Image (tube, rainbow, N blue to C red):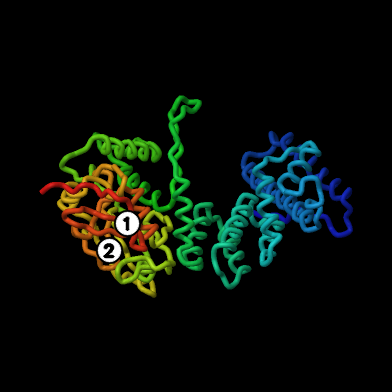
Amino acid sequence: MTSTPFLPSPSTSGEDAAAQLAAVREVLERVAEGLVSVPAHELAGLAAAATAVVAAAEAARAAVVLEASSRGVIAASDHPRTHRWVEQSCRDAGVPVAKGRARQLDEITRTCAGVDVHCLREAVVAGRLPMETAALVAKVYRRLRVTIEYPHWDDLMEILIDWAASGASRAELERLEDVMIGQYGRATELDAEHDRDHRKRELTAFTRDRAGMLCATLRLDEASEAVFTAAIHALSAPRLDDDGLPDPRTSGQRRADALLTLAGVACDPDEKVSGTGAKARVVVTMKLSDLLSGLNERGRLDATERGYATTGFSQVLSPTEARILACDAEIVPAVLGTRGEVLELGRTSRTVTPGQRMALHLRDKGCTYPGCSMPPAWCDGHHIIHWAAGGLTHPPNLALLCRHHHTVVHRHDHTATVDPVDGVRWTRRDGTPIGITPRTPAVA
């Protein structure tokens, strides 16, 4: 249900508009007094009507702020930043506004000051988009303006508005942003975007909440979250209890138990299970051209990478991130042709076998990147010449790398040589050696 927001007619003065808004406010304040006499079956309709009024009021507020911005009123004031102007104006009138709301108005105002965005202004003023959604659309659009090359910006804004108005979530809008960057961004732009996200990853220390429970916050980039979600999903499926009754645990409890299971496996090594537990299985779908983009015949990067991949859990990855996972995670690549047909549904057999991993443990003794002391159980088996470029999964083409240095090697296109005597030696793209002391190989 939508409603056209109150807007004064051209002949209405500021005083008349304020008086009309005050009258509307007075009517709304009296609604609660008469609710006890409203029949029960009419309350749902009143709730919907009140929601429409709130949406209309927010649209009217946005219209006023946009008008003040376009006239230069805000820029000429003592608070030239929109959110500060809104906060101070409301504070002076004795009706403080939440800082989050003021910042949403600021985001919308800044975006509407640009070109090709008249449709966003119209959608906001008409109450078509809730304030939070309109602010998110504005933020996504502003980021895309500086990261992609798109022929029709007004059409893109219409797409964002239509999708948001139909109920798209924040995650879905941000996923669309990644898809657009992969499709229309500059070469390696999506990879650079995710690399920036990767540097922000963190797991906070546990603190107690008011209920006495220990809580921590986990922040991950898309590629890392893909592996994490796949592992948790695999271990958190509902199970029947001993009496054959449905699993009594909530979904949150099942995910928590899955995380504890992963921690338990890591802390209780099983000599029969190489690497202490299997890697999580991730199904990745991408075009063949995207998988190979940026790779030459030797599997080296040549700075022309574009495109994107999607996982079975809807994460959007760059081709480089997909290749990193494909080295040793139990990734199943579904490679698509130009018309979207499945050319190949890869199998996990191209990953390092238990026998090969044991041989790598004995040969490399841990992460082979110079200066790293990560033990072998916590390392990936890296293809020196990537399997997508024809590299074989056998020890002369494999080296152990911890997840951090595995990412470094892929990001910076480092390569290596494997020598029975000297072990694994890493070099940069220009051929200069990395480090001077390789790990001592195992004695036969």
Rendered image: mark on residue 392: none
Residue 30 visible somewhere in the drawing: no
What separation in Å lies between label 2 and label 1 (alpha carbons)? 18 Å
In depth, the one of 261 and 110 nearer the eye is 110
Look at mark 2 in the image and give the residue it sits on: 385
- The count of marks equals 2
Residue 386 x, y percent position in the rendering: 29, 63
Side of 85 where 241 appears, left or right: left
- Give the percent coordinates (x, y) of residue 351: 23, 57
Identity of the residue drawn at 29% across and 56% down:
426
Please tell me whether residue 49 is drawn above or below residue 126 in the rendered image. Answer: above
Q: In which quarter of the image is residue 330?
A: bottom left
Give the amino acid type for the residue marked by disc 1 in the picture: Pro
Question: If you read the primary sequence from the N terminus, does the residue marked by circle 2 or circle 1 appear first?
Answer: 2
For numbered disc 1, what is the local secondary structure?
loop
Farthest residue, direction front: 436
Residue at 36%, 47% (x, y): give it.
228
Using a 10 Å C-alpha cutoff, classify the residue at mark 1 as few (fewer than 14 neighbours), some (14 to 19) or many (20 or more). some
The residue type indicated by label 2 comes to Ile
Residue 433's disc is 1
Viewer-side label of 2, 1: 1
The N terminus - image quarter: bottom right
Q: In the shown orientation, is residue 46 left or right of residue 306?
A: right
Q: From the viewer's perspective, is 155 left or right of 319?
A: right
Helix, strand or loop at mark 2:
loop
Left or right position of 52 against 226: right
Q: Residue furthest bottom?
A: 339
In the rendered image, is residue 192 in sight? yes
Q: How crowded is mark 2: few (under 14 residues within 10 Å), some or many (20 or more)?
A: some
Residue 388 position in % (x across, y down)? 29, 66
